[in-house]
Amino acid sequence: MSQVKKYNILYIMSDDHASHAIGAYGGRLAGLDLTPNIDALAADGILFRNCFVTNAICTPSRACILTGQHSQTNGVLDLNGSLPTEKQYLPQELSKLGYETALVGKWHLHEEPNFDYYKVMADAHEQGSYYDPAYFEKGVTEYGDLHANPELATVKEVGHSSDINTDSSLDWLENKRDRDKPFFLMHHFKAPHDYFEYARRYEDFLADIDVPEPDNLYDQSTWGSIGTRGENDSLRRVIGTSVSRRHEIRNYVFNYFPEGGPEDDREATHQAYQHYLKRYLRCVKGIDDNLNRLFGYLKENDLWDNTIIVYTSDQGMMLGEHDLQDKRWMYEESANMPLIIRHPDMDKRGVETDMLVNNVDYAPTVLDFAKGETPSYMQGRSFAETVATGDEVEGWDSSVYYRYWMHMVHHDVPANFGIRTKRYKLMFYYGYHFDESQMGTPSTEWVGKCNKVVQTPAAWELYDLERDPDEDVNRYSDPEYKDIIAELKAEILKKRAELNEGDEKYPHLQAIIDAHWED
């Protein structure tokens, strides 16, 4: 890639936007015309099919993106983690390279953003409100913890957050940036984060359409393990929040039908799913329409051919697959991140790659775009060469590592780690919180209402993605895969050692791992 000048970089990130809710990725939702502007970006750039989050939850994912480090190294394991200003490496490194840095929209890393300019969504939990959101704005308000100090002054806006975040980015581009410097703008949507409050103008979008459903919404008979189902399915009612009535504490049938809904379980699930997906997809439509505004500004102001555009999400989202809601899981729909990049000076356009990348690779790649080097403290690698040529980088890693730490909270997903190659995925559910003080008494009679989380069974799951792309059949006990499993376990050990992802600091977890490694 010829780099004769420094390009502006526009990094766009939605929240929980699953790859299979983007037309360019294909899949069952592709025919709904959800994302014409994102699809056009893919047609003019490169689409990554195998991009994966390292820890599928908002705060840790964002920390990985900004630091180029996995969760144990950057210290942000869960939603309570924070990223100090001195560890917000990406904007600091870009500033050294002469870039003006800006951040607009959702932040969710608790400490003040270390950007030249920011306007970030403010509420007691840093999620931001869909409607009439408040913001902390650099130079206008004092940044702080609204939970601890609800009297902090904020900028109040009126309207839907997707529109307002775009208005704010356009305002910065037009009126507030230093035009003598290249810019790095992180434009972050709140949408389509649960509870999917879409702009009211989308009320009729998809109203008369039956949204296609995943087959495994209704049948999960060969999926999972005792780590995700319990012995003899004893924990099906408490592990993994559901669309159907399966999960007794949090399910979308109850959300949609607080009075009970249809007696027939399949019909109740069908109606709840349609409600769930249509709300979600209306939020997606709002994102895509606002990207049209953002891209239009770049084109009208002679910035389009001098700006690298990245579109991604902080993770994926379960859209009813395996009768699951939310993210957190290592299953494809949750762990797979959309990643589409358009570079003004790329050799090929409208190409796809199946190279395995993850979100710790984002910071090194952006720095490479800016003519910088990857600092030694970053664990990710730049894939800018692939953006330039469309070809996989020679000697690139053949696997990516994943770990979810937040054991059995919010959406009741057991703690786990695993590895993903182009064909196989091996996961280990160790089923215990990293902080023992959070644990209650282990019990298969737990009903999800105790003050502390409890231990769940340890178990392995193996999926052959070539034979079974929907991950319907756990093949861990199949003797045909004995040698593959041994190779994948060796790769897991290698990754855990290389990436500072072992459990030396958590001997209670290491004891579980050791006890079940050869199961």
Image (tube, rainbow, N blue to C red):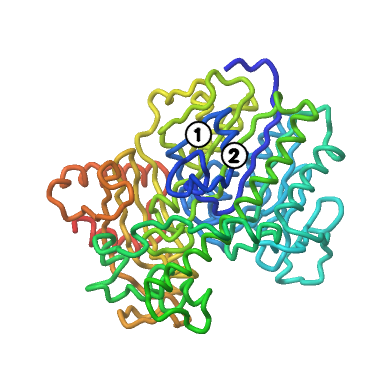
Q: Residue 106: image x %, image y %?
A: 67, 54
Q: Nearer the N terminus, badge 1 or badge 2? A: 2
Q: Is residue 242 visible?
A: no
Tell me if residue 91 can be seen.
yes
Give the image quarter of residue 301.
top right
Q: Is mark 2 on a helix, strand or loop?
A: helix
Mark 2 residue type: Ile
Q: Residue 10 carries which label?
A: none
Picture coordinates of residue 214, whole percent (x, y): 38, 56
The answer to whether 374 is drawn above or below residue 252 in the figure is above
Residue shown at the point (64%, 23%) measured from the top left: 344
Few, some or many residues within 10 Å of mark 2 (<14, 14–19, 20+): many
Q: Is residue 322 left or right of residue 75?
A: left
Quadrant in the rendering for residue 416? bottom left
138 left or right, relative to 397? right
Apparent side of residue 41 relative to residue 440 in the rendered image (left or right): right
Q: Residue at x 40, y 81 (%)?
A: 263
Residue 434 in which image quadrant: bottom left
Q: Determine the residue positioned at 59% across, 53% down.
A: 15
Indicate the amino acid at tag 1. Leu
Contact check, label 1 and label 2, Cβ < 8 Å:
no
Q: Is residue 348 above or below residue 490?
A: above
Q: In this view, does 377 lie above or below 282?
A: above
| SS for dot 1 | strand
Pick the quarter of the image with the C terminus.
bottom left
**Which is nearer the eye, 429 or 513?**
429
Kindly identify which residue carries mark 2.
38
Residue 153: percent from left, percent from top: 84, 64
User: Which residue is drawn at the image coordinates 53% and 81% (left, top)?
Assistant: 258
In the rendered image, the quadrant that contains the N terminus is: top right
Give the residue at mark 1. Answer: 47
